[in-house]
Image (cartoon, rainbow, N blue to C red):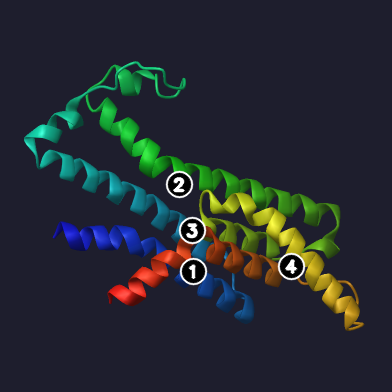
Amino acid sequence: MIKEIMLIINYAPLAAMALFFLWALFAFWKKKSFWLPIWLLAGFDILMAALKSVVQYWVWDQSQLTRVINNLPLKKLDLTWFGNLPIFTAYQHGYFLFYAWNNFWRSTFLAFIAAGLIYFIFLALRKYKKSLLAEREAEAGLLFALILGWPQVIFFLPAVFIIAVLFSLFNLARKCGATCNLFWPLAVSTALIFIFSGQMDSIRYLLFKF
């Protein structure tokens, strides 16, 4: 049972990334809204963090040696100010809560913050000059940023800029003008970051294991 659950936890995010990436391409092709996959992906990320937390608590609870960890407060050590908050240091389950935050929830929270910042940057660019982004490209950028997650999303904006410049140069070379639809640089950047971020190791493992 635990083996099957761990397989789901390890590879469901990978399958979700592929599914939502294809959904983004489909939404662009059919001129559909990106908001439905955005909200579903955000919900999926929260669900996965919650599932990992529950499974971790359950695993520790199976052994007398580790069961005590679930009921201990976090000791005040040389931690950041966040680790010394009373919810971790003064209450039962504090150690588990800090462990769950540090290993499961923090990356989700940071991914949401980074994706939101990217979205507002795109909105600001569109407000500054509408020709820089088409109407739905800010939402597309938000979706692709959520697909990448933390910490891969850190490289998203620089990659989009470089790919957009390359697309523009290619258009110039073809004498099609320097304008470039930003959706394809967004999609290509997401795919390249995914490939070069170590995710391909997981794909190879899946292919050879099954």
Residue 150: x and y in percent read: 51, 49
What residue would you read off at disc 2? 108
Residue 38: x and y in percent read: 52, 60
First of labels 2, 4 by sequence position: 2
Q: Secondary structure at mark 2?
A: helix
Residue 14: x and y in percent read: 41, 65
Residue 79: x and y in percent read: 42, 21
First of labels 1, 4 by sequence position: 1
User: Can you tell which mark lies on residue 20?
Assistant: 1
Which amino acid type corresponds to the residue marked 1 in the rendered image?
Phe
What residue would you read off at disc 3? 39
Which amino acid type corresponds to the residue marked 2 in the rendered image?
Thr
Q: Marks 4 and 2: in contact by CB < 8 Å?
A: no
User: Can you tell which mark lies on residue 88?
Assistant: none
What residue would you read off at disc 4? 182
- Distance, label 1 to label 2, CA atoms, is 16 Å
Mark in front: 1 vs 3: 1
Mark in front: 3 vs 4: 4
Q: In the picture provided, is 174 more to the left or to the right than 161? A: right
Which amino acid type corresponds to the residue marked 4 in the rendered image?
Leu
Q: Nearer the viewer, residue 80 or 200?
A: 200
Up-down relation of residue 149 to residue 132 (above or below):
above
Q: Secondary structure at mark 4?
A: loop
Name the image quarter holding the N terminus: bottom left
Query: Which residue corresponds to the image point at 85% horizontal and 52% vertical from the top-left?
Result: 128
Label 1 environment density (alpha carbons within 10 Å; few <14, some 14–19, many ≥20) = some
Query: Which residue corresponds to the image point at 73% horizontal and 53% vertical from the top-left?
Result: 123
Which amino acid type corresponds to the residue marked 3 in the rendered image?
Trp
Q: In the picture provided, is 170 more to the left or to the right than 63? A: right
Q: Secondary structure at mark 3?
A: helix
